[in-house]
Amino acid sequence: MKITNIQELEKIAKEIRRNIIKQVYGAKSGHPGGSLSCADILTVLYFQQMNIDEKEPKNPARDRFVLSKGHCSPALYATLAERGFFEKKELSTFRNIEGNLQGHPDMNKVPGVEMTTGSLGQGLSVANGMALTSKLNHDGYRVYCLLGDGEIEEGQVWEASMTASKYKLDNLCAILDYNHLQIDGTIEEVKGLDNIEGKFKSFGFHTIVVDGHRIAELIDAFETAKLTKGKPTIIIAKTTKGKGVSFMENKAEWHGKAPSEEEYEKAMHELK
């Protein structure tokens, strides 16, 4: 499946956003802000870029995706269900103790989840291992890893960046969900994190900066990443936390809380 129509991809992204809100509201807990901000990125990856088959989720030739910011599992679950890895009705079991769709994704329970994540900062290291394996075995698959901008305050991210550069992992593409907000406020206030593009360049990455909500820009960036040889790529996607729901947009307090019934109705109305 490779959808090339931009409007169709935008429709899918909106449906993913609707199902993000449904999951968090139903569970009365979760992380809507960062899930909404990365919906367009996941749409392009799963419906336009990645070599995957929902009927063969363990096909050795498949591309891999690691959700390093694992708390944004509602976005991944909504995307996997939309693609057909499991039935959409399972989304109603999000964060149910007896269900498979836990607050952080579990590779042993959910079809299509490549790595159990949640401890921030570790995903890029795992993605490195996958990409290096692909090269050593001449398998040819690509690896994608989605990072949060608050997450890259973790030191292990930069150790992993050195490793990716050292081994010239040009089959690795990291994506930064650059929405400027984390649980305690802006990334600039919390850690003084700036010049992110310059930092990744200095660690040996090919860097691409895009509007993370423009489907066409994301497609072009991923295609450029495929053509980049001799070094890993990071796509710095400028996004809006809570994208698509007016009262959640650019609000740090929506990092990790569920909407009330009134807020849920308003959000779903806006996402029609």
Image (cartoon, helix red, strand yellow):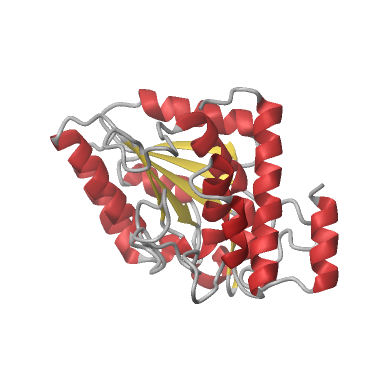
- Position of residue 129 in the picture relative to residue 1 (left or right): left
**Near-viewer residue (257 or 236):** 257
- Position of residue 24 in the picture relative to residue 47 (left or right): right
In the image, residue 227 sits, relative to residue 163, either above or below, namely: above
- Position of residue 78 in the picture relative to residue 106 (left or right): right
Q: Residue at x 48, y 51 (%)?
A: 195
Q: Residue furthest left?
A: 136
**Near-viewer residue (29 or 111):** 111
**Near-viewer residue (84 or 244):** 84
Q: Quadrant of residue 5?
A: top right
Q: Quadrant of residue 249?
A: bottom right
Q: How many marks?
A: 0
In the image, residue 47 sits, relative to residue 201, either above or below, namely: above
Q: Where's residue 240, x and y in %?
A: 67, 52
In the image, residue 143 sits, relative to residue 195, either above or below, namely: above
- Position of residue 144 in the picture relative to residue 135 (left or right): right
Q: Quadrant of residue 25?
A: bottom right
Q: Residue at x 65, y 57 (%)?
A: 20
Q: Where's residue 211, x and y in %?
A: 62, 39
Looking at the image, can residue 250 be seen? yes
**Near-viewer residue (75 or 60):** 60
Q: Residue at x 64, y 63 (%)?
A: 23
Q: Residue at x 52, y 30 (%)?
A: 48
Looking at the image, can residue 252 be seen? no
